[in-house]
Image (cartoon, rainbow, N blue to C red):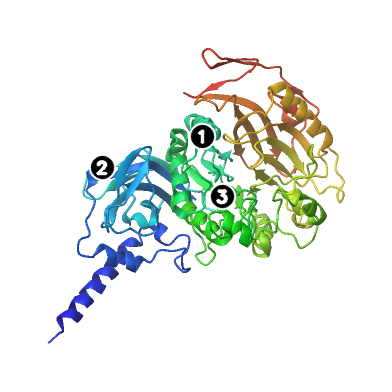
Amino acid sequence: MVNSAVFGLAIELLLATCATAAFDGNINYASPSRRHSGLGIDVPHVSRRSLKRGAVAYEADELEFTHGVASGDPYPDSVILWTRVAPSLVSDTSNVTVEGPVPLYSHDTETYIKADPSPICVAWTVSPSGSEDVVSSGTAYTTSDIDYTVKVEATGLEPFTTYNYQFTICGSDKISPVGRTKTAPPSDSDVSELKFAVFSCSNYPNGYFNAYGNAARKDEQDYILHLGDYIYEGNQKGERAHEPPKYLFSLYDYRTRHGQYRSDPDLQLASQNFAWIATWDDHEVSNNGYRDGSSALNNTEESFLNDGRVSVDQRKMNAVRAYFEWMPIRQIDLDDNLRVWRSFQMGNLLDLIILDTRNYDRSITSLDWNDEYIDLIRNDASRTLMGSHQENWFYNQLSTSSNRGATWRIVGNQIVFSHIVESYGFSGDNWNGYMANRNRTLKHLYDNSISNTVFLAGDSHQNWVSDLVWLDEKPYDPETGEGAIGVEFAGTAVSSSGFSGLIAAGRAEAEVLVDNNTVLQWQDGYYRGYILLSITPEKLEARYYGSPSVASRNSWDLPLANFTVVASDNKLVRPVGGGSVEAGYLRGGETKPTNLTLNTDTWEWDIVGYDQMYITS
């Protein structure tokens, strides 16, 4: 006879195994890493917990798609899809379901989570745009362990094709908004054109995310590229005050902040209709982060005791885990849970190389109290922005891209690469603080004759356009651009503060910066906005757009300047910007006079002097 207890245990283990397999449909159970304690989810435990006597399932009418839908990291045959299905906007308080009804509060509305609820089943479908034929589908489960997020990989897709996708709560008619996404072209294909909208630095309390909405409604780009500072970890007040109202340390803190940002309608619109390729900057974790700390949490006992009793490593782990839960991003190396550096081969046209110059393995940076020390060591050969592993990978990616015959190399990094001195001197927190690392990069480009390299940067909250040059080592003529090895396009913020004065004062400051920096061709610090990159085998065009104000939600989308790089020229086309821009200061060119005033009675902008205007409402 079979012992009934043993038989019952066997049945329980069998059911748990089957349930565990079902959880594999949601890749957030493996992110950031199932192989490292504290970074992954114990899925067998979650499965067993859901089978416990008394576990109660949510009814469909208790659940909502709380934060829209999103997609990202497109491959030729697959794309990542994301949503969140939950009983509340509120994030879970921990990484496991708590025992008993625990009250959680949001905007003075009391909500509850069930004790040991059964997993929520979500079905998803993908169809070609304009068709109802389902070409990829599946089911996935989610629980409070991953903050009720759902992240799946839709496979079996055709390359460079637009698709619609949607989520449904299993066994119900409750559906998500319809999302739109696009796969990447195959690496060996001829691609006539690709367009990217480039964003960075979206600070929720600092202003409205007009740039996201304006670009989404214009609908010109194939993909969205976000260069970091997607959230901010601070504690800002005001009309759009941060939630939770504190600096972020715990997993719950970071989850809640991601949820708040993704509640913005313009961010939801841009996420719903375009595949994102994202990397983090520092504020997704902590300001001026590096390998062993940040400006807000140093790796000392005193800092630990004063800053929430959370260690540097634990805080970073909490931030990374929440980021992977809430972003439509692939985790490409489960043994390297901090890795977001990765690349995308998009036809013969370009390789998109995404770096992490902040959190992965960066040497000590400016921490607001050590600037004299940073000045002493900024050119030390041992200093690195990326760590040896990523740095060697980066150089190999550049060479592999050139050798395979891709026309362009687009480098998405967080911080300004070019040799630029500002009014206070050299920054210690961008590539100027790691001069030897920059020199190694430039040496690799020049020594291997790698052409058509374009660096993209965010972080500074201002616009900068420069020829890419190894100053003091290679001859360079700023009037013609001869001697350059590429170009850098650094963009302003979605909403974070830039130049704090008026337009005229901003132009005067820009003129000083351009005059004092040989490689700098255009600068503007006044506007918030984004860059639209249009890339063909013959040329690359960068169009800068700006919003006159982020103090209100508005649809003004002003063209600021346009720049062109001809393939194999490795420099900006002269006259730079066509000889005329709408904002900032242009070397050797003019800034068109613009009359821009704000009517404080109606809070509407009167703008005169623009040849083009996009109203995207």
Name the residue carrying label 1. Answer: 212
Compared across the picture, whether 315 is left or right of 489 comes to left
Tag 2, which secondary structure?
Answer: loop
Q: Residues within 10 Å of mark 3 (few under 14, many from 20)?
A: many
Q: CA distance from mark 1 to mark 3?
A: 17 Å
Residue 371 visible at all? yes
Name the residue carrying label 3. Answer: 279
Name the residue carrying label 2. Answer: 174
- Give, as a three-letter code, the residue at label 3: Thr
Tag 3, which secondary structure?
Answer: loop
- Image position of 568 with respect to 142: above or below: above
- Give, as a three-letter code, the residue at label 1: Tyr
Q: Residue at x 53, y 44 (%)?
A: 231
Residue reaching furthest bottom? 1
| Location of residue 511 (image quadrant) | top right
What is the quadrant of the N terminus in the image? bottom left
Mark sitting earlier along the chain (1/2): 2
Q: Position of residue 584 (x, y in %)?
A: 71, 27
Compared across the picture, whether 565 is left or right of 148 comes to right
- Give, as a three-letter code, the residue at label 2: Lys
Q: Residues within 10 Å of mark 2 (few under 14, many from 20)?
A: some
